[in-house]
Image (tube, rainbow, N blue to C red):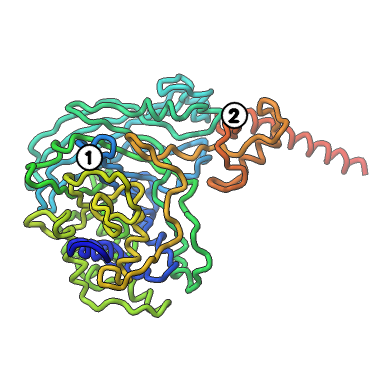
Amino acid sequence: MHGPAWRRGLAACVCGALAAGGLAAAGVTALEPRAATASSHREAPLISGQPQYDNTDVYAFVSPDKPDTTTIVANWLPFQEPAGGPNFYTFADDARYDLHIDNDGDAQGELLYRFTFDTHRRNGDTFLYNTGPVTSLDDPDLNITQTYDVELLKLHDQKLVSRTKVADDLPVAPSDVGRASMPDYGTLRDQAVRKLKGGGQAFAGQADDPFFLDLRVFDLLYGGNLTEVGRDTLKGYNVNSIALQVPTNALLKSADQPVVGIWSTTQRKDAHGDWTQVSRLGNPLVNEVVNPQKDKDRFNASSPWNDGDFLKNVTAPELPKLIEQIYRIKAPAEPRNDLVDVFLKGVKGLNRPPHVRPAEELRLNTSVRPSDDPKRLGVLDGDDAGFPNGRRLTDDVIDASLQVVEGELVGAENDLGDAVDANDKEFGKAFPYVAEPTSGSRGPLAKGTKGGNDVRNQLGDALAPAGSDGGGTDDTTLIALSAASGAVGFLLVAAGLLWWRGHRRGRDAY
């Protein structure tokens, strides 16, 4: 590893995120820990059955186009099949989606941004998500809509000091049903970016899943076979995103202490009507591969100031031992105090706050300006504005973690990676930065078709799997086999009935 001592700590941090988080074991040249890094995609037994409440990833970075602001992106509801209608993907009405900010390193949140949602239905006499082409968020043809409120809670020692509503009834960007239903989805996305009272802006809606990785790692760490690598498992899938951009000085307790710790939680009401935390996420990788089955649900219900309860999972991680068993790569000696020191505290000299209480938070030094030339490996490649100093959408947390786990910081230089170096879609250059979702319709019209009336061509295109290379071009002539184009389904059914009747007649004639 090249660079100052704190950068070595960073490698240890990434290693910690891996080793502590589970990726530390993935120390093979092509070993694809992407699955392990699939940050909180189905990471615990209970939450895997509650996708609306399942937080998949958290990102935090100084805004590249507005460096006096900080952007936080948190995603929920993983593995959205784009054409999964007629009931498309909404935030839960009975949930509190919370973004926590610890601005003094005590493992307690001093600021909490709370997002709550309401679902609205215009017409209950149709199965359609939209009853015609949607050209704006207030289009009457958008049958199912959502709005949300944003509250800012200020706390001290977990006691409420003040509560301020900074947004009221903001519109949510809908699921991208398809091109027949939403011919210009970019306009809908732009209309969903709204200002907040007191400064900043917010966005809520569907987006392309920004995490890039190969989930086959859970097939017993590739079963010792590294030939099937380089496939982004999340390509073509969407998530529900909440993005928040606020003036950085609004997050800090003091300009002398620019490091903030960030994590997200989801609360929902239990059978008794009480609010219960069911999901929690800060750094990637932690609950997937660091915590064993017996601790996963308990971790999701816990808080950072109690992370000592899970310390053994970090000091004696399971993943390196699995890697050693399968690939004969010797696991580092235990206890992994290096991981505790760096991963739970932040990198010394970069994003470790003074008098820090060790806790699982995504720590960001807001005084580090955005890089003009971002490196996907972040601090490991000399880019101090990247992971693990916060997490940008483009940061390759898998490769960075792999290289650190295999000794990059202690002189064993390597170029390990999972062969997936970037997201399948390019990210935006302005807020909310996440890429637009994959559309529910995909595939170009066959040559010679007119106006999209060839049902067979539409059916063939619709049957191409999400994110596949088979005709998945971004052509404006794409046809949507979507809820709004219900006539297509009717024609198909009618054609099937005519064939059946003819077939029956043929049989009766014999």
Q: What is the x, y in percent for residue 217?
A: 44, 64
Q: Residue at x 32, y 47 (%)?
A: 373
Can residue 234 be seen here?
yes
Residue at numbered disc 1:
70
Cα distance in 3D space between marks 1 and 2: 41 Å
- Kindly identify the amino acid type of the residue bearing the numbered disc 1: Thr
Q: Residues within 10 Å of mark 2 (few under 14, many from 20)?
A: many
- Kindly identify the amino acid type of the residue bearing the numbered disc 2: Ser
Give whichever of 228, 457 is nearer the camera. 228
Q: Is residue 182 left or right of residue 8?
A: right
Give whichever of 151, 424 is nearer the camera. 424
Residue at numbered disc 2:
485
Q: What is the x, y in percent for residue 159?
A: 8, 43
Q: Residue at x 66, y 38 (%)?
A: 459
- Total numbered circles: 2
Give whichever of 230, 310 is nearer the camera. 230
Check contact, mark 1 vs mark 2: CB within 8 A: no
User: For residue 140, which quarter of the picture?
Assistant: top left
The disc placed on residue 125 is none
